[in-house]
Amino acid sequence: MPPVKRALAVGAGLVALCAALDDGLARTPPMGWRSWNCYGGDVADGVIRDTADALALKRPSPWGGENVSLIDLGFARLGVDDGWEACGTGWDDSFHAADGTPLVNESRFPDLADLVAYGNGRGLDVDWYQINCICLDAYDLRANQSWAALAYAADVDQLYDNGFAGVKLDNCKRRCGRPPRRASRGALARRAPRREHTPQAATTTARALRRA
């Protein structure tokens, strides 16, 4: 058998052996809208609500028949990206409080749970953004492991408490933000392992603290 036909036959056999989990999840990539490419860090509650309305708006279908919205076509996720945090208002000029709570710029986002409920009411899953770039505090978190554990757990709690359906985790690190100004002082001199920045570590930390 020629090599090309042999390769096709093997491929067809492998496809026949594959079985997908038929639970209705992830049948398409995540489809929707996220604020960064349109607004960068200049984002606020009103922009997100206006976008929710636009995604839900019924328009004439190019195929005829009933009017359809972008949600009807599968674009049913609405993502808040960077720009929500209250930069420099937390511990060590970060946007996390001493107890780890992520600090929201309430002049831009006065009520996250209400914003999520608004999007849900339009038929959208509302997504969030963490490990932020605009006012990066990853250096400070890496330099203080105990505070980092509180902050990562509180980040997870923020998602659950406000009803977000998903989260985008960024990874700016050395590409932006400020260097560790206090890295030579006491406990801050001890840098946290790189693995503490993974979403798996954040989830594990949150679960462990809840069990404690």
Image (cartoon, helix red, strand yellow):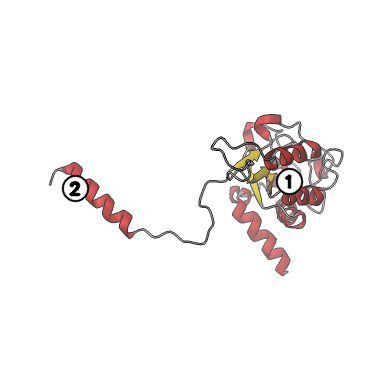
As drawn, the residue found furthest toward the bottom would be 211
Q: How many marks?
A: 2
In this view, the residue in front, 197 or 44, is 44
- The amino acid on which the numbered mark 2 sits, given as a three-letter code, is Arg
Q: Residue at x 72, y 48 (%)?
A: 122
Question: Nearer the viewer's eye, disc 1 or disc 2?
Answer: 2
Identify the image quadrant of the C terminus: bottom right
Q: Secondary structure at mark 1?
A: helix
As drawn, the residue found furthest toward the left would be 1
Disc number at residue 188? Answer: 1
Q: Secondary structure at mark 2?
A: helix
Disc number at residue 201? Answer: none
Residue 20: x, y in percent? 43, 59
Q: Residue at x 67, y 59 (%)?
A: 205
Disc number at residue 6? Answer: 2
Residue 33: x, y in percent? 64, 39
Mark 1 Cα shell of 10 Å, populated few (<14), some (14-19), many (≥20): some
Residue 26 placement, left or right of 34: left
Mark 2 Cα shell of 10 Å, populated few (<14), some (14-19), many (≥20): few
As drawn, the residue found furthest toward the front would be 65
Residue 23 placement, left or right of 153: left
Residue 157: x, y in percent? 74, 57
Residue 35 placement, left or right of 21: right
Residue 158 in sight here: yes
Q: Residue at x 60, y 50 (%)?
A: 198
User: In the rendered image, which quarter is residue 77 located in?
Assistant: top right
